[in-house]
Amino acid sequence: MPAGSYQKINYSLRPSKSIERKMLAEAMQRMSCFGRLGAYRYVGFGSTYFSDFKLFHKLLGIKKMVSIEEDESNQDRFKFNRPFSCVRMEFGKSTSVLPKLSWREKNIVWLDYDGMLNSDVLNDVSFCCTNLQSGSMLLVSVNAHPERIDNSVPPELRPDKRLDLLKERVGEEKVPIDIVGTNLGDWGTAETYRRIISNEIKETLLQRNGARKNPIVFEQLFNFHYADGAKMLTIGCIVFRDDQRDVFEKCAFAQMDFVRFDKTVYPIEPPNLTFREIHYIDRYLPSRISMLSLGGLPKDDIKKYSQLYRYFPTFSETEI
C-alpha cells in the first residue's frame, strides 16, 4: 500500500471493510477441504492496524504470516504494532518483496492496495498466479473511484481522458478493446478493473500451464463493491489443479450468499443505524424480518442490515 496512507485512514474503523474482512474469513474456513488451514501462510499489507492478521490468526489458526510494508521510513512503528510474534515483517514495495518469499506452501494472499489499478498491481497478480500452489487464494483490492479530471478539461472530453490515463497506468494492451471512456464513470471503473485483473490471471495461468495435462485453473469467488469514502473493488479467486475440482466443489462456496463467480456484484452497503435500532432489529432476525415495522427507519436500511447483520461491526467509545 502507498507509504503513509495509514496515517490518514484508520483501517480498523471502516465498516464496509470490516464486513468484507469477516465475509472473507468465513469463506476461507471452507478451504480446509484443500488442507489444514493452520498450515497455510497469509501474506498481506498489515499497515499499523493489522486488522486482517488478527482476525485470520485467531479464527483460522494461521501461524505463518508475512506483512509487506512499503513505508520503510517508519519500520519501528510497524514493528511496535505487530500483533503476534508469528507475523514476519518485510519492508519494501510488494513487487520487490514477493519474489524474495518462498512459495512452497499453500497461501492466502491479499494484495490490499488503496491506490488505483496500475502495472505494478498487475505484475504482483501475475507473479502470484505463476507461483501459488494448488488450493491457494488470491485477493486483490484497489481504489475503483473514477479518475478525477482537472477542470481545465471540458466535460465532454473527460471520459476519453480517463481512458487515456488508464491505458498509461496499466498498458494499452491490457485494456479490453470494447472499453470506452464512458465505461469508466461511477461503478463502471470497478467492473473494468475486474475484467483487467481477471484477464491477467487467465493469461498468466495459460503461460504457466503450457501443454501440461493437469493445468492450474482458477475460480472467481468474490466481486465486492463498497465505499467507506472512495469506491473500492475486491476481486478474489482460488487456484487449484484441474483434477481437484471435486475438492473445490466440496468447499460449497456456491452456498454462500456473497460469493460471485462472474461479473455479478455483491455490494457491501451497511446502513447507518443506532445501537438501539440494531438491537431492536436483531430480535426479529433471522426469520421474522418481514414482521418488523420501525417507524421512521427506511425499510431499505432494515433490508440491508438483515443481509449483513452477522458481519456487522459494532464500534463504541470506552475508556481503558
Image: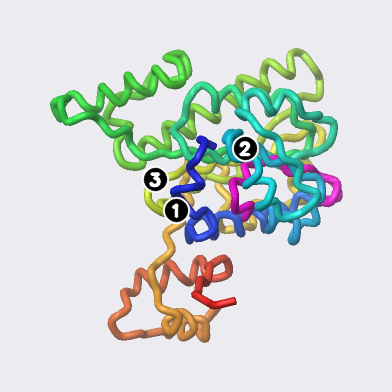
Q: Secondary structure at mark 1?
A: strand
Determine the CA span between mark 2 and mark 1: 28 Å
Q: Using the rendered view, name the quadrant where residue 23 is placed.
A: bottom right
Q: As shown in the figure, which amino acid type bears the numbered disc 2?
A: Glu
Q: 68 left or right of 251? A: left
If you read the primary sequence from the N terminus, does the residue marked by circle 3 or circle 1 appear first?
Answer: 3
Asked whether disc 3 touches disc 2, contact meaning CB atoms under 8 Å apart, the reply is no
Image marks 2 and 1: residues in contact by CB distance under 8 Å: no
Question: Vertical placement of 317 versus 109: above or below?
Answer: below
Residue 48, magenta (yes or no): yes
**Other residues around mark 3 within 10 Å, as few (<14) / some (14–19) / many (≥20):** some
In the picture of the structure, the residue carrying the numbered disc 1 is 267
Say which amino acid is labelled 1. Pro
Going by the numbered disc 3, the residue's amino acid type is Lys
Q: Position of residue 11 (x, y in %)?
A: 52, 53
Residue 34 part of the magenta-drawn span: yes
Question: Percent position (x, y) of residue 202?
Answer: 61, 24
Q: Earlier in the sequence, mark 2 or mark 1?
A: 2
Q: Which residue matches tag 3?
A: 231
Q: Position of residue 210 (x, y in %)?
A: 74, 14
Task: Look at discs 3 and 2 and give the one toward the viewer.
Answer: 2
Residue segment shown in magenta:
33-51
10 Å neighbourhood of mark 1: few (<14), some, or many (≥20)?
some
Tell me the quarter of the image containing the C terminus: bottom right
Say if residue 252 shows up in the picture: no
